[in-house]
C-alpha cells in the first residue's frame, strides 16, 4: 500500500514543480527566449537523444537558426546558449557567476572538486594556491623539458626513416602527456609506458560515457548511474585513471622523502626569484605537484585534494594541447604557403640560436604563434563552457532567470562572420597587432576569459611552439585526411570521429 501511495505521490510532486517552474517567474522569463518547439513534460529530450556526431550538428544548427541566443529544456532543467561577445562578456567578467553548471557534476567521480569543477570559496583558495606554479621563472625551467619532448617526437619520425604517415591524435597525445607529467608533475613517464597507453585510451572512452550520460537526466545521480552497465564500465575506467595519477603522486612524494624534502623548502622565495637565480631553480625543477605536496604538509590540502588537481591538470594539460597541435598541423599541411612561412621563421630562429630553442627563441616565433591562435579560433580545443547564474542576468536582449544552465558557445563566436569575415578561411594575419586592437575582446576566448580564465595558457602556447617548431624545421607535411571531411563529435574537447593523418616528408638540408 505504501509503495502504491509513493508511486502516486511522486508524479504529483513532479507535476507541481513542473507547473511552478514553467509558469512562475522563472518560466515567464525563460520562455521569452527563442528556441525550437518542445513537448510538454519532457521538453527537448527527444531532440538530444542522438549520437555524438548528430549532437554536434544540432548545436551548430540551432546556434545559426536562433542567433545569437537560444533556449532548450528537459524536464525541470533550463538551458540557454549564448555566443554574442557582449553577452559572453557579461557572464565571463562577472565575479558572481563563476560557478560551473550541473553538467560538470558528471566529472565529479573522476576529477572531484578540483580547479575545473569547483566553485565559490573552494575555487578561490585552489586558484590562489596554484597560481605561483605558472610564474615566469617556473615556466622558464619547463622550457628545456618541452623542447626535449618536441625533439623526441621529431626523432621518432626520423628513426622510422623516409616518408612517414601518422594518425596525429595518438601520436601527439603521447608526447603532450609526457610533457605535462614531467613539467607540472616532475615525473618522467619512461618507466610508465604501459600505464600511459591505458590512461589515454581511458580518457577517450570517458568522453563517450560523458555524452551518453549528459542528456539522460535519469542517469544524472551517481548512485543510479553506477547500477547501469555503462556505470560499471565507468567504475573500471576510473580505476585506471586514478591509478595512473596516484602512481605519479606516490613517485614524487617518494622523491621528496629520499631528498629529505630539501627542494620543498623556501618554495615561494625560489619561485619569485629574479632571473639571475633561474639556473638554481632549473636544477631543482620545481613542479606544480611540489606546490600541492607542500600545501598538504602545511595542512591546507588532503591527499584527495592533491589527486583532484593532478587528475584535472593531467587531463586538461595534455588533451586540449594535443588537439590544438593536431589541428594546427593539419591546417599548415593544407596551406603550403603558410607552412613555408612558418618554416622560414623557424629556420631563421634555429640558425640564430645554433639549432637550439630557448624561452626567448620560442617567444620570437611570432608568425607560428599567429598560426596557432588562428587554429584555436577555427578549432578551439575547449569549444564550450557551462555556468549557472546565482541571480537574474540581464543580457543584451533577454533576462536569464537565476539557476539556469548557461552554455557559452566558444566555437560559435569564433566563427561568427560579424566579427570574423570569411570565418572558415585560415588566415594567421587576423592576429597581427593592427587587426587585434579594434576587435571585441570576447570574440576570441580559446582559454576562456575573466576570473576563471585558463591558468595555464602561457604554458600551453609555449608547449605548442616547442613541439610544432622542430617538426616544421625537419619535415614537410602533407595531408592524407582533409579537414573538409572532418566529422566533429561532442566530447570533452573538440575531437573528430575520423582520423587526422598527415605525411611527414624529411627536409633535405643543403650543405654550405
Image: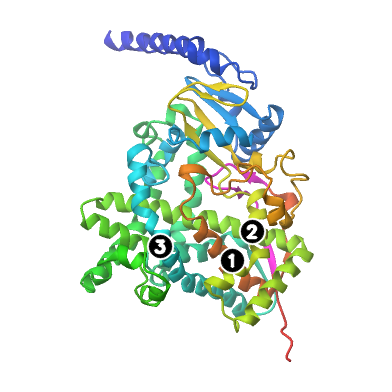
Measured along the vertical axis of the image, is residue 352 above or below residue 22?
Answer: below
Q: Is residue 247 visible?
A: no
> How many labels were placed on the picture?
3
Residue marked by disc 1: 465
Tell me the CA gap for discs 3 and 2: 22 Å
| Mark 2 nearby-residue class (10 Å; few <14, some 14–19, many ≥20) | many
Q: Is residue 502 magenta?
A: yes
User: Which residues are the magenta region?
Assistant: 487-503
Is 306 placed above or below 154 here?
A: above
Corner quadrant of residue 296:
bottom left
Q: Quadrant of residue 158?
A: bottom right
Q: Contact (CB < 8 A) between labels 3 and 1?
A: no
In the image shown, does 356 or 225 lie closer to the viewer?
A: 356
Quadrant where the image shows the C terminus:
bottom right
Query: Residue at the location (48% across, 12% down)?
Result: 25
Closer to the N terminus: mark 3 or mark 1? 3
Q: Which residue is drawn at 56% across and 36% down?
A: 89
Question: In the picture provided, is 80 more to the left or to the right than 341?
Answer: left
User: Disc 3 marks which residue?
Assistant: 184
- Judging from the image, what secondary structure is the residue with disc 1 in? helix
Residue drawn 42% across and 45% down?
116
Of residue 61 and residue 48, the one placed in the foreground of this image is: 61
Task: Looking at the image, tell me whether mark 2 or mark 1 is earlier in sequence order.
Answer: 2
Residue 48 percent coordinates (x, y):
58, 29
Q: Which tag, 3 or 2, sits closer to the chain's start? A: 3
How far, Cα to Cα, is label 3 from label 1? 18 Å
Q: Residue 372 carries which label?
A: 2
Amino acid at each position: 500500500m505504501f509503495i502504491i501511495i509513493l508511486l502516486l505521490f511522486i508524479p504529483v510532486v513532479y507535476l507541481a514543480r513542473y507547473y511552478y517552474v514553467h509558469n512562475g517567474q522563472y518560466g515567464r522569463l525563460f520562455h521569452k527566449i527563442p528556441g525550437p518547439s518542445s513537448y510538454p513534460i519532457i521538453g527537448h529530450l527527444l531532440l538530444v537523444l542522438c549520437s555524438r556526431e548528430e549532437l554536434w550538428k544540432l548545436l551548430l544548427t540551432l546556434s545559426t537558426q536562433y542567433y545569437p541566443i537560444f533556449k532548450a529544456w528537459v524536464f525541470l532543467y533550463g538551458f540557454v546558449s549564448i555566443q554574442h561577445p557582449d553577452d559572453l562578456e557579461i557572464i565571463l567578467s562577472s565575479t558572481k557567476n563563476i560557478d560551473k553548471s550541473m553538467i560538470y557534476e558528471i566529472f565529479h567521480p573522476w576529477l572531484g572538486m578540483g580547479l575545473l569543477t569547483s566553485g565559490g570559496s573552494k575555487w578561490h583558495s585552489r586558484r590562489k594556491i596554484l597560481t605561483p606554479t605558472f610564474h615566469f621563472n617556473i615556466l622558464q625551467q619547463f622550457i628545456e623539458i618541452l623542447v626535449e619532448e618536441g625533439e623526441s617526437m621529431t626523432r621518432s619520425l626520423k628513426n622510422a626513416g623516409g616518408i612517414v604517415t601518422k594518425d596525429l591524435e595518438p601520436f601527439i597525445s603521447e608526447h603532450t602527456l609526457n610533457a605535462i607529467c614531467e613539467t607540472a608533475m616532475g615525473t618522467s613517464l619512461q618507466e610508465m609506458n604501459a600505464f600511459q597507453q591505458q590512461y589515454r585510451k581511458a580518457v577517450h572512452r570517458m568522453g563517450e560515457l560523458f555524452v551518453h550520460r549528459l542528456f539522460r537526466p535519469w542517469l544524472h545521480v551517481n548512485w543510479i548511474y553506477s547500477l547501469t552497465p555503462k556505470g560499471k564500465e565507468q567504475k573500471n575506467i576510473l580505476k585506471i585513471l586514478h591509478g595512473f595519477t596516484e602512481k605519479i603522486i606516490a613517485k614524487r612524494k617518494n622523491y621528496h622523502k629520499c631528498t629529505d624534502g630539501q627542494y620543498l623548502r623556501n618554495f615561494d622565495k625560489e619561485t619569485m626569484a629574479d632571473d639571475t637565480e633561474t639556473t638554481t631553480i632549473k636544477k631543482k625543477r620545481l613542479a606544480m605537484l611540489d606546490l600541492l605536496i607542500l600545501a598538504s604538509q602545511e595542512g591546507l590540502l588532503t591527499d584527495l585534494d592533491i589527486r583532484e588537481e593532478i587528475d584535472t591538470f593531467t587531463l586538461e594539460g595534455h588533451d586540449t594541447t594535443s588537439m590544438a597541435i593536431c589541428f594546427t598541423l593539419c591546417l599548415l599541411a593544407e596551406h603550403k604557403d603558410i607552412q613555408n612561412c612558418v618554416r622560414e621563421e623557424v629556420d631563421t630562429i634555429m640558425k640564430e640560436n645554433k639549432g637550439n630553442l630557448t624561452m626567448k627563441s620560442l617567444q620570437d616565433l611570432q608568425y607560428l604563434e599567429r598560426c596557432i591562435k588562428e587554429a584555436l579560433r577555427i578549432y578551439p580545443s575547449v569549444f564550450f563552457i557551462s555556468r549557472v547564474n546565482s541571480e537574474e542576468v540581464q543580457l543584451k536582449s533577454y533576462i536569464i532567470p537565476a539557476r539556469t544552465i548557461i552554455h557559452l558557445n566558444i566555437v560559435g563566436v569564433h566563427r561568427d562572420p560579424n566579427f570574423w569575415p570569411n570565418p572558415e578561411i585560415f588566415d594567421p594575419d587576423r592576429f597581427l597587432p593592427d587587426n587585434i586592437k579594434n576587435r571585441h575582446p570576447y570574440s576570441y576566448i580559446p582559454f576562456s576569459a575573466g576570473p576563471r580564465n585558463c591558468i595555464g595558457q602561457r604554458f600551453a602556447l609555449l608547449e605548442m611552439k616547442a613541439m610544432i617548431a622542430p617538426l616544421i624545421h625537419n619535415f614537410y607535411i602533407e595531408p592524407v585526411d582533409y579537414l573538409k571531411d572532418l566529422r566533429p563529435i561532442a566530447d570533452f574537447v573538440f575531437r573528430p570521429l575520423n582520423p587526422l593523418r598527415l605525411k611527414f616528408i624529411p627536409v633535405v638540408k643543403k650543405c654550405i
